[in-house]
Image (cartoon, rainbow, N blue to C red):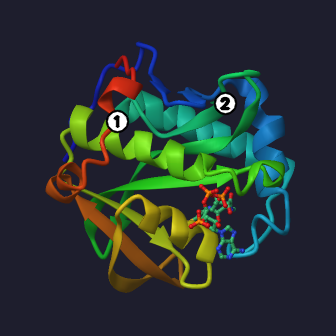
Amino acid sequence: MIQAKTATNVLLLETTRLRLRRFRRDDVDVVFAIIGDAIAMKYYPRTFNRKDAEDWVERNFQRYAAHGYGFFAVTLKESDEMIGDCGILHQEVEGKDELEVGYHLRRDHWGHGYATEAARACMEFAFLTLRAEKVISLIRPENLPSRRVAERNGMKVERQVIHAKLPHLVYAITRKEFEDKRLATRSDLINHL
Ligand SMILES: CC(C)(COP(=O)(O)OP(=O)(O)OC[C@H]1O[C@@H](n2cnc3c(N)ncnc32)[C@H](O)[C@@H]1OP(=O)(O)O)[C@@H](O)C(=O)NCCC(=O)NCCS
C-alpha cells in the first residue's frame, strides 16, 4: 500500500509541453467538455452530465485528501489552457489494490502525443516518488487510442478482467521494466508533495 502523503502541499508535474496540477473547482467546464462528449466516451458505459463532471472534480479533492494524488488537470505550458486530465488512482482489481495511470483529453487536442507525455510523467511519479512496484492501466479492448498510449509507454497486456461489469485489459509495467526501458525523464519533471 502506498503511503498517504500530506494533502496540503502543492503537487506539480512538468514535462516538455505540459504541466499537471491539482484540479480547481472551475475546471468542471473542461471536465464536462470531455466526459460529456459522446465520441470521447465511446468506450464508457455512458456519456456523463454536468453534475457528473462536478462529482468527478469533487472525487479528486477526496483523493488528494486521502492520498495526495488522483487525477490532475493537464495544461499546456505555452498557454496555461487545460486540455484534459491524467493521474494516478487506486483501483481494486480482483480484490487487490493497484495503482492505475488514467487519462482523458479534450477531443480537439487528440493526436499530438499529449496523453502519452502526461501518462509517462504520472508513471514516473508513481515509480520514483511513490516507489510503486507496478503501475497498471485498465483499458477496454476496443479502445485502440488508449492502448497505443499504454504501449508507447512500455506497458504490456497482463490479463483480461471484468471491471465495472465490462471486459478490460490490464496493461502493466513494473518499476524495473520502466527503469530498464529508461522511460524516466527525471530532469524533465518537478514534483512537490
Ligand atoms: C485515450 C486518449 C487520451 C488518447 O489521446 P491521443 O491524443 O490520441 O493520445 P496520443 O496522441 O498521446 O497517442 C495516441 C496513439 O494512439 C493512436 N491513435 C489515436 N487515435 C487512434 C484510433 N482511432 N485508432 C487507433 N490508434 C489511434 C495515435 O496515432 C497514437 O499512436 P502513434 O503515435 O503510434 O500513432 C484519447 O483518445 C481520449 O481522451 N479518449 C477518451 C477517454 C479515454 O478513453 N481514456 C482512456 C480510458 S482507458
Q: Is residue 65 above or below residue 107?
A: above
Per the image, label 1 sits on a secondary structure element best described as loop
Residue 99, percent from left and from top: 33, 54
Q: Nearer the viewer, mark 2 or mark 1?
A: 1
Using the image as rendered, state which of residue 163 and residue 111 is in the foreground. Answer: 111
Q: Along the polypeptide, which appears first: circle 2 or circle 1?
A: 2
Q: Residue 79 occupies which quadrant of the picture? A: top right
Residue 42, percent from left and from top: 75, 74
Q: Residue 96 occupies which quadrant of the picture? A: bottom left
| Residue at image mark 2 | 75
Say which residue appears at 27% left-offset and 71% top-offset.
95
Residue 185 is marked as 1
> For the residue marked with disc 1, what is the amino acid?
Thr
> For the residue marked with disc 2, what is the amino acid?
Thr
Instruction: Give the Cα separation between the discs numbered 2 and 1.
Output: 18 Å
Say which residue appears at 35% left-offset and 34% top-offset.
67
Residue 17, percent from left and from top: 60, 31
Residue 157 is marked as none
Please count the marks in the image. 2
Say which residue appears at 40% left-offset and 27% top-offset.
188
Q: Is residue 87 above or below residue 102?
A: above
Q: Residue 64 occupies which quadrant of the picture? A: top left
Q: From the viewer's perspective, is 112 left or right of 1?
A: right
**The C terminus, quarter of image:** top left
Using the image as rendered, state which of residue 187 and residue 39 is in the foreground. Answer: 187
Q: Is residue 165 above or below residue 110?
A: below
Per the image, label 2 sits on a secondary structure element best described as strand
